[in-house]
């Protein structure tokens, strides 16, 4: 047996071992949707990093930031939480809890003194020229550590750089409902849960026709219309959502991620425009409301204007 043949057999054996391991694996695995409750603090000064607990949020004074504190839906193995926590979750069951210490380099990075720079105060808006202000300089996000005269020291490290993080979690549940899965992903990306639902639609598609064996290879491809079923995630786009910066900048990537993870064929975003209470276009056109959908002659009569006189005047102007 040659070396290449031996290598191929070894590779096939490895593939079989992986398949067996996947079939016999117990507990949660990569790709599973779970509902997670957690609270994370820095280990040294116990500064709150993040939480899903409304009581903790109230104690720490962060409950008035417009965020809803409740269990969060994540996909195991997709980097939605710290990798060390994901690794701890694999093999667990709903109801299990754990505590993981995430080292600084795997949390928000080690503190780098070179990322503290002195810049001209002229680069900073006057309202932000004070220690602790968050600023953006040349596309980099940082905060002012000191400011003296016309110079400012700006720290471009993450505010929690250099801190280990203690992460306590409880697996509240496994999320099997696909609409709930999609809602959880949207909340993670946008900070809000839009109204959504999944339906199976019949859609007409142009599909290529298989050429005959004796057909010219250079001939133009032919297409025919077929009716196919597509599983569609419908999404109602509220004004709050359409103005969401994350959605405006990354709707294509978000939609594609939802398609892949939830397993639908497409995402359709529906924009809803509510009625204006009978106001019509008139309220937007400076006093023409009565003419928007009513009878023009009646409107002219109400205004005590003779329509024939207007016509005569227009014809005279043309002459």
Image (cartoon, grey):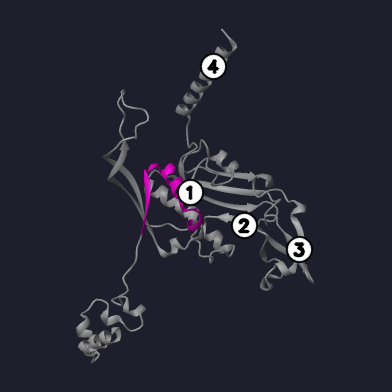
Q: Mark 3 packing: few (<14 Cα in 10 Å), some, or many (20+)?
A: some
Residue at the outermost top position: 1
Between circles 2 and 4, the one closer to the viewer is 4
Q: Is residue 17 above or below residue 55?
A: above
Q: Is residue 98 magenta?
A: no
Magenta segment, which residues? 247-270
Task: State how far apart marks 2 and 4 are (Cα).
Answer: 52 Å
Look at the image and tell me in which quarter the C terminus lies.
bottom left
- Whether the residues at callouts 4 and 3 have beta carbons within 8 Å, the answer is no
Q: Which residue is mark 2?
A: 48
Work out whether mark 1 precedes mark 4 in sequence or the reverse, and give the earlier one: 4
Q: Which mark is residue 119?
A: 3
Work out whether mark 2 precedes mark 4 in sequence or the reverse, and give the earlier one: 4
Predominant secondary structure in magenta?
Answer: helix
SS category of the residue bearing label 1: helix
Q: Residue at x 46, y 54 (%)?
A: 187
């Amino acid at each position: 047996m040659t070396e290449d043949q031996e290598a191929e057999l070894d590779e096939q054996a490895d593939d079989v071992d992986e398949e067996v391991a996947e079939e016999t694996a117990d507990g949660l695995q990569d790709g599973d949707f779970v509902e997670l409750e957690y609270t994370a603090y820095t280990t040294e000064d116990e500064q709150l990093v993040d939480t899903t607990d409304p009581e903790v949020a109230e104690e720490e004074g962060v409950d008035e930031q417009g965020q809803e504190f409740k269990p969060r839906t994540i996909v195991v193995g997709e980097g939605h939480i710290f990798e060390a926590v994901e690794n701890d979750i694999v093999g667990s069951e709903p109801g299990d809890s754990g505590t993981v210490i995430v080292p600084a380099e795997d949390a928000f990075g080690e503190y780098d003194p070179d990322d503290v720079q002195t810049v001209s105060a002229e680069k900073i808006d006057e309202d932000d020229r004070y220690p602790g202000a968050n600023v953006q300089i040349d596309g980099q996000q940082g905060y002012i550590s000191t400011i003296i005269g016309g110079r400012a020291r700006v720290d471009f490290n993450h505010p929690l750089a250099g801190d280990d993080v203690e992460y306590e979690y409880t697996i509240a549940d496994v999320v099997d409902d696909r609409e709930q899965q999609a809602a959880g992903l949207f909340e993670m990306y946008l900070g809000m849960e839009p109204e959504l639902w999944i339906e199976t639609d019949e859609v007409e598609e142009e599909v290529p026709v298989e050429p005959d064996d004796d057909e010219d290879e250079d001939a133009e491809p032919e297409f025919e219309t077929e009716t196919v079923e597509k599983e569609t995630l419908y999404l109602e786009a509220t004004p709050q959502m359409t103005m969401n910066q994350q959605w405006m900048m990354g709707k294509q990537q978000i939609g594609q991620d939802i398609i892949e993870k939830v397993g639908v064929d497409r995402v359709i975003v529906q924009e809803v425009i509510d009625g204006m209470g009978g106001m019509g276009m008139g309220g937007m056109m400076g006093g023409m409301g009565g003419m928007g959908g009513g009878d023009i002659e009646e409107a002219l009569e109400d205004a005590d204007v003779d329509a024939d006189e207007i016509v005569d005047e227009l014809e005279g102007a043309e002459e």
